[in-house]
Image (cartoon, rainbow, N blue to C red):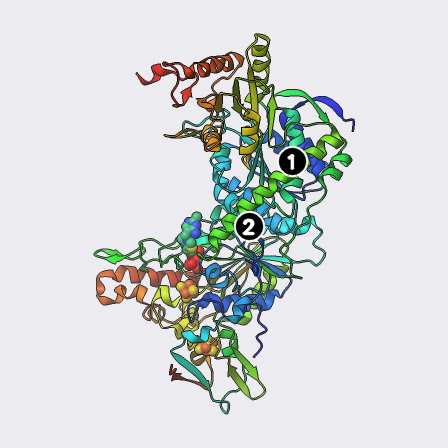
């Protein structure tokens, strides 16, 4: 299908996609850099372009709770947040996932206080990684648009029924302008379908939601989330494939790869950094260096098999993290290392902390990372500890 | 014997639970076309154990601090689908979930003028976690976190005035009700449901475990709370008081003495000032609302 | 998990299978000759286990927890307590 290409702000691209998916209920609470999305949606609703119940919330805790209640009542529900707001939602998201409520949430990634900041990194969504919610990290504005269109169907699939986060880096994606191809609302609505809940709050068939449970079933309900995320894998593959067939765009399913075939070093990353890496990889390839890229698109479900397959026989992997588990290092790197455990091919995995708290990661930094990683085989080279790019050591003396 | 109540028996409330009486009566009035929302607390725990729910109407609990927001969401969800049967949303929460941890969310619900009836069953402490003091615990009442030792006489400050807080939000229907006057409770539930916009009903629901009295005295104590003037039965529409239950005031001691949580006030005259303050509270209420 | 629904959701009114009558140490006994069928005991019973029949109030001992509120609230003292022998 042919769409219309225009220069759009990232937040606007998201709002366009959300509008076309026609959520029944939207509830949001403002936090930088998510505000433009909710302002756009508020305008769409008040001008009649979108027939949703738009509920101003008194906090992110309430916003998440409002979409929770709406979803339990059988409505398609949407919210968006960032940083402190996501952390405030944490308790609600756990319950939402376990109660199997397929809310779509735009997570505009931003670092966590203190010091308070509005700089982007992935610490916020990583803090919610164990909730059971699905997480898709996008690299471009087009992908932000595409992923939102795909998200409702993935989350609301009767075999999945989980909240889904579409994660996009604050500012770099939310506030930048790029050409984005937008498709007619009718076509998008048709693709997104409508929410057909398997159960809901309904006087015609009264059900009890949020019951009290003991050890006989608690582990079982956590395991059910494992199974649902497995189902989500298949669903993400099929929905992204169908999206490609209908709209001609493909941004990857669980992962995406770039020039990995004969690569001797592969960079693994998520989010907007990926597009910087793409450009750096092309430049390095032009210099004759065998560098490739694996984009982790879905952090949950975690694509271990896809990553291993994409890395093939590459002897060296550099993982670029924008989030930290204090004392153990980059969170993506830790999961990648775990994925390779027991694998016949055992590449050297070098973890990098790059872009934490908005620290600049440009092509020069990426090339530096490649150079450092390539020394991993040397005696003086890195030995598994996280390498902090751009860290001001003077700060500590 | 077939039981037709919408709040089924077999629930796990302590024998003589005041909240259980209230819920049964509330559901008689709401009827089946209602979705009930509750925060965490005794009510949630004793009604919802998995595989043995006592709710015959759709019911949802999510967390301790978000019942009003869940209620708003459920209503928005219904409205987004046209709500063809005019299903109502009613929240029933404890004092902890209302006066304390759910206050922000409740304030938001009030301010947005969401068409929800919120009923607080006030047992004046965090009972479900073992009788800790809440901001609804009254002056002089002993709880595990407002202990009675040395010079400490239980709760050292007055309870929060939830009615005033609801009124300050411009909530169009605000009332108090008692489980000792069920016809009045039902009438108020009906009014709260029919009123467009938010409604708030505060009920005092004695808890024999937390207050320390015999289970059979639950209704009698609820009655005494009213008759002393300590729990005035009042009703406001659009900010104006439209009714106040007249009483022939009885001494506050009749209400306080049967309860262990107030026993220290009667051991010696060390806490005479506290008793005086409680008496004054009753008198002030009687004057303020013209109860006598 | 066959009897459970997705996401910890469960069916309505399943508490009715729980025999809370086992908790009781005293049982209320209604004197039908005195009962005026006013329904106060049924209204105040926290456990929905008093029912007003043709010839007076009847306790559902399967659920009655023996709180004795019904005795206290009966206006004509038609209900008395008996020790529950186990
Ligand atoms: C966020 C959070 N904090 C604390 C608790 C523990 N908690 C559960 S119920 C409860 C007390 C509830 O008190 P109230 O609302 O007065 O209801 P009651 O049990 O007295 O009926 C507490 C403190 C919790 N579940 N969640
Ligand atoms: S502790 Fe009190 S409020 Fe809780 S169930 Fe028992 S009697 Fe009811
Ligand atoms: S003793 Fe209590 S539970 Fe039993 S019938 Fe009387 S009021 Fe109901
Ligand atoms: Mg309480």
Locate the C terminus of chain A by quadrant: top left
What residue appears at the point 62 percent right and 42 percent down from the top-left corner? A155
Q: Position of residue A89 (x, y in %)?
A: 50, 41
Q: Chain of mark 1?
A: A
**Which of A168/B178 is in front?**
A168
What residue appears at the point 52 percent right and 73 percent down from the top-left corner? C48
Which residue is label 1 attached to? Answer: A237
Residue reaching furthest bottom?
C33
Which residue is label 2 attached to? Answer: A99
Q: Is residue A117 visible?
A: yes
Q: Is residue A278 above or below residue A328?
A: above
Q: Secondary structure at mark 2?
A: loop
Residue reaching furthest top?
A287
The mark total stands at 2
Q: Position of residue B273 (x, y in %)?
A: 27, 59
**Which of A51/C16 is in front?**
C16
Whole-number angstrom distance, CA of label 2 to CA of label 1: 24 Å
Q: Is residue A373 above or below residue B32?
A: above
Q: Position of residue A191 (x, y in %)?
A: 73, 38
Q: Position of residue B285 (x, y in %)?
A: 42, 61
What residue appears at the point 56 percent right and 11 percent down from the top-left corner? A284
């Amino acid at each position: 299908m042919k769409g219309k290409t225009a220069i759009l702000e990232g937040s606007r691209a998201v709002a366009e996609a959300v509008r076309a998916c026609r959520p029944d209920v939207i509830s949001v609470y403002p936090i930088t850099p998510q505000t433009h999305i909710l302002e756009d949606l508020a305008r769409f609703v008040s001008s009649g372009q979108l027939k949703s119940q738009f509920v101003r919330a008194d906090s992110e805790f309430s916003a998440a709770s409002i979409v929770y209640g709406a979803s339990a009542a059988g409505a398609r529900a949407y919210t968006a947040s960032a940083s402190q707001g996501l952390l405030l939602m944490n308790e609600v998201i756990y319950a939402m996932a376990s109660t199997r409520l397929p809310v779509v949430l735009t997570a505009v990634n931003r670092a966590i206080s203190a010091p308070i900041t509005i700089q982007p990194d992935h610490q916020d969504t990583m803090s919610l990684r164990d909730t059971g919610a699905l997480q898709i990290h996008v690299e471009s504005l087009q992908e932000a648009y595409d992923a939102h269109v795909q998200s409702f169907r993935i989350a609301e699939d009767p075999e999945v029924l989980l909240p889904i986060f579409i994660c996009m880096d604050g500012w770099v994606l939310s506030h930048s302008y790029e050409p984005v191809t937008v498709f007619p609302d009718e076509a998008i609505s048709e693709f997104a379908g409508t929410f057909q809940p398997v159960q809901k709050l309904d006087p015609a068939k009264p059900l009890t939601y949020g019951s009290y449970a003991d050890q006989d079933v608690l582990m079982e309900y956590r395991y059910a989330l494992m199974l649902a995320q497995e189902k989500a894998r298949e669903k993400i593959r099929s929905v992204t494939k169908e999206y490609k067939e209908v709209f001609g765009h493909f941004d990857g399913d669980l992962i995406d790869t770039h020039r990995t075939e004969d690569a001797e070093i592969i960079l693994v990353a998520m989010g907007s950094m990926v597009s910087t890496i793409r450009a750096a990889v092309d430049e390095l390839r032009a210099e004759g260096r065998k560098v490739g890229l694996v984009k982790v698109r879905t952090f949950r479900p975690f694509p271990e098999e896809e990553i291993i397959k994409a890395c093939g026989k590459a002897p060296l992997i550099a993982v670029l993290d924008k989030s930290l588990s204090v004392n153990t290092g980059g969170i993506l790197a830790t999961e990648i290392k775990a994925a390779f455990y027991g694998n016949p091919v055992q590449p050297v995995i070098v973890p990098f902390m790059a872009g934490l708290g908005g620290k600049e990661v440009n092509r020069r930094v990426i090339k530096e990372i490649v150079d450092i990683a390539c020394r991993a085989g040397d005696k003086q080279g890195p030995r598994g500890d996280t390498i902090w790019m751009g860290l001001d050591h003077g700060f500590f003396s | 014997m077939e039981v037709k109540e919408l709040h089924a028996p077999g629930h796990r409330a302590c024998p003589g639970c005041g909240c259980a009486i209230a819920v049964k009566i509330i559901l008689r009035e709401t009827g089946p076309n209602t979705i009930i929302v509750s925060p965490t607390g005794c009510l949630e725990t004793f009604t919802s154990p998995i595989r043995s729910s006592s709710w015959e109407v759709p019911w949802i609990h999510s967390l301790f601090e978000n019942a009003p927001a869940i209620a708003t969401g459920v209503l928005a969800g219904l409205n987004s689908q046209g709500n063809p049967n005019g299903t109502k949303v009613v929240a029933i929460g404890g004092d902890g979930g209302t006066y304390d941890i759910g206050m922000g969310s409740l304030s938001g619900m009030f301010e947005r003028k969401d068409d929800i009836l919120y009923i607080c069953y006030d047992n004046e402490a965090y009972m479900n976690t073992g009788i800790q003091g809440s901001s609804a615990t009254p002056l002089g009442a002993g709880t595990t976190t407002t202990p009675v030792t040395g010079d400490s006489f239980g709760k050292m400050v007055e309870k929060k005035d939830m009615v005033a807080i609801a009124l300050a939000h411009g909530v169009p229907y605000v009332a108090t009700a008692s489980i000792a006057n069920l016809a009045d409770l039902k009438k108020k539930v009906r009014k709260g449901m029919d009123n467009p916009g938010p409604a708030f009903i505060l009920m005092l629901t004695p808890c024999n475990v937390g207050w320390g009295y015999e289970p059979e005295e639950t209704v009698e104590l609820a009655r005494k709370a009213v008759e002393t003037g300590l729990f005035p039965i009042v009703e406001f529409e659009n900010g104006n008081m439209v009714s106040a239950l007249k009483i022939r005031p009885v001494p506050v001691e009749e209400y306080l003495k049967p309860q262990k949580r107030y026993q220290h006030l009667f051991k010696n005259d060390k806490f005479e000032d506290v008793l005086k303050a409680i008496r004054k509270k009753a008198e002030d209420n009687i004057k303020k609302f013209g109860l006598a | 998990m066959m009897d459970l629904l997705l996401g910890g959701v469960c069916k309505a009114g399943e508490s009715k299978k729980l025999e809370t009558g086992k908790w009781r140490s005293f049982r209320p006994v209604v004197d039908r000759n005195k009962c005026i069928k006013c329904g106060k005991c049924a209204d105040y019973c926290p456990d929905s286990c008093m029912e007003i029949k043709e010839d007076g109030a009847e306790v559902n001992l399967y659920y009655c927890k023996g709180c004795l509120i019904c005795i206290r609230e009966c206006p004509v003292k038609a209900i008395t307590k008996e020790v529950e022998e186990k």
